[in-house]
Image (cartoon, grey):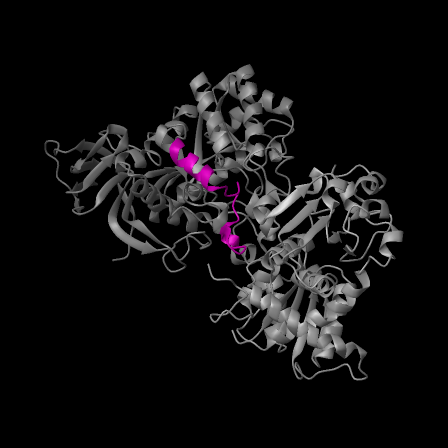
Amino acid sequence: MANPQLNRNGELIHLLSTEGLPRDIVNHILDTAQTFVPLADRDIKKVPLLRGKSVFNLFFENSTRTRTTFEIAAKRLSADVFNLNINASSTAKGESLLDTIGNLSAMQADLFVVRHEASGAPHLIARHVAPHVHVVNAGDGRHAHPTQALLDMYTIRHFKKDFTNLTVAIVGDILHSRVARSDIHALTTLGVPEVRAIGPLTLLPGGLEQMGVRVFTDMRAGLKDVDVVIMLRLQNERMRGALLPSAHEYFKHYGLTHDKLALARPDAIVMHPGPMNRGVEIDSAVADSDRSVILNQVTFGIAVRMAVMSIVAGTQA
Amino acid sequence: MKLHIKGGRLIDPAGGVDAVRDLYIAAGRIVSVGTAPADFEANRTLDARGLAVLPGLVDLAARLREPGFEYRATLESEMRAALAGGITTLAQPPDTDPVLDEPGLVEMLKHRARQLNHAHLYPLGAMTVGLKGEVITEMAELTEAGCVAFSQADHPVADTNVMLRAMQYARTFGYVLWLRPQDPWLSRGGVAASGPYASRLGLSGVPEQAETIALHILFELQRMSGARIHLCRLSSAAGIELVRQARREGLPVTCDVSANHVHLTDLDIGYYDSNYRLEPPLRGQRDRDAIRAGLVDGTIDAICSDHTPVDDDGKLRPFAEAEPGATGLELLLSLTLKWADEAGLALSDALARVTSRPAAILESGAPALPPCGRLDAGAPADLCLVDLGARWRVGRDTLVSQSHHTPFVGMELPGRVRATLVGGRPAWEAAA
């Protein structure tokens, strides 16, 4: 089956998932992002790569942070940006997803940035848009959040240089996390020899071993000698439905404290896709410490999203 | 009207026949096989040379979408699709809108079907009012109105006490309960089989234990009540093994699988192809192999189409939001032939799974039904003429059903029905 995010020449036309993304494309995105990072410190922060192009941010699910960074990234590429919170408008009126896309395509959209609560929604959109229109997945259900994973890879590369000698632990609600899935695929693609998932069995999906992941239920054992700790956000609704008894008990066993972090390598970095629940998955003392690179992730995120948008928009289907 | 079907290869699994034989039909029934009765003068002779003559197929699960969902498909369009697929007898689950839980509704549906004068339509009555799993329906009244068995469609009963009472009540009158084993809690929200592929795609899973736990409960309640059960659309290797043990123990149980599950696995979902969004979800290679083995060793009695027409609006959605189901009436025969070919089975043995065996299941709970799924002297002349060598491509232009959503769209399949007869009347003929 053809990989729907690549064209016949193996070039990136949509970014839907980090699974099946060739290593040279990942490196190309990271290298391109690196050229955009210094822009942030310039007086004029814009480049004209997407001048005259229309980027539509289609957020079917609430998000402030991701939408804002995509908006900043598109504007720095000189695109015209339109933000649509679809929750509030068309789906409430019963319009189907593809009708919404059809209407916006008629407004000469060049690139859709899509967040949707259903896994696979960006694939559906990518299958139905005109050949010159590009789709970037900004998070679909539990499936994928590829730009988050790429900015995580950028951050790791920035601080650790080489992927091939690292141990990376992802901690928390892996079951519901699109960030975890995308990180796992990106890390294994880049040659990280050991990827660990840490969490209670209620929050670990089946099939992790097949993705090349070592599973730990004991956080202390799982953090032993790791180079990178990626903490995941714990949604409040997980307290319902018998997945967890309480935030308090969760923090006690799976919250990141300095005490637990001491088991990792002394130079281990701490990452989090945000927004953080302080005192639930991460202790404030860790989040605000010099081990935390959480704010660097946000800054790099803009450059990585610029790289992704400029690369896909520059490729012909 | 007297009809002579000449020179065809007659395959009648019920009678163990697979040979070139002529059929002689009068007054809607087969009057002789092989040799012409004395003084037989045909009004019409059908040249069946080069074709197979099969009993009309018996499909144990076909949703025709009436009443209530006529925008997706109508009784007329889907009954025509049945004939185009060589199906002359079909059972419709009760999950219509309104639900088939009142005799008046069943009579109306039977009346509509009779007016259309196509295939024989046998409704399954709802086992509980509104399929809510709380109060059992007037099963005797519903039977008088035309129901052949009772079912919960895709709405499993959670309350084991209600399930037990329904079994005891059905047993009282000798009715059969047709149930799809699925634990309502473990399957809640699930859209794909639990496993590595669903995890990768980020889709909520239904574990195989949703099927096996439900089977354990049903078998225990059967041991208490002695009720006869037909299990619908099994999906897992572990489930099939439990059925095998139950049959060995002597529990009165039969079962079917959908034709889709004989051929497909969850990997075929690919990149979220919503045509593969089915209920129950497709499982792994091991499960598909077990389904095939169960069909061969007789643990599984029948293959059904599980025909569920879904329109574009229902399918052009993200996978988890898409409506489950696929059109199937016109694929049942071809998918059975494909399986027979791949498994190296004698045609007669394979076709028994869509003719004589499902017919026996229908008749076990409704002995007054006219016989179906067989072609011996005295049986109603429900049959189809099939070009076994023809291949056809599944698509919008080749399907009669109002829905063209099936996992097999675009694929080439063996076997094409040339004509279908119901009660000796040519009810459908393929365009030349």
List x then y, in percent, for residue B332. Answer: 37, 44
Quadrant of res A254:
top right
Residue A40 in the figure: left or right of residue B113: right
List x then y, in percent, for residue A168. Answer: 69, 52
Q: Is residue A276 above or below residue B153?
A: below
Q: Residue at x 48, y 43 (%)?
A: B63
Instruction: Name the outermost residue toward the left.
Output: B39
Residue A127 in the figure: left or right of residue B414: right
Q: Nearer the viewer, residue A299 or A219?
A: A219
Q: Nearer the viewer, residue B37 or B349?
A: B349
Q: Is residue B219 above or below residue A289?
A: above
Residue B155 in the figure: left or right of residue A247: left
What stretch of residues is rendered in magenta?
B269-294
Quadrant of res B250:
top left
Is residue B276 one of those drawn in magenta? yes
Q: Is residue B388 above or below residue B231?
A: below
List x then y, in percent, for residue B217. Answer: 58, 24
Q: Is residue B152 above or below residue A257?
A: above
List x then y, in percent, for residue B162. Answer: 63, 24
Q: Residue at x 81, y 63 (%)?
A: A295
Residue A302 in the figure: left or right of residue B103: right
Total marks in image: 0
Is residue B286 one of those drawn in magenta? yes
Say whether residue A83 is visible.
Answer: yes
Say whether residue B253 is visible.
Answer: no
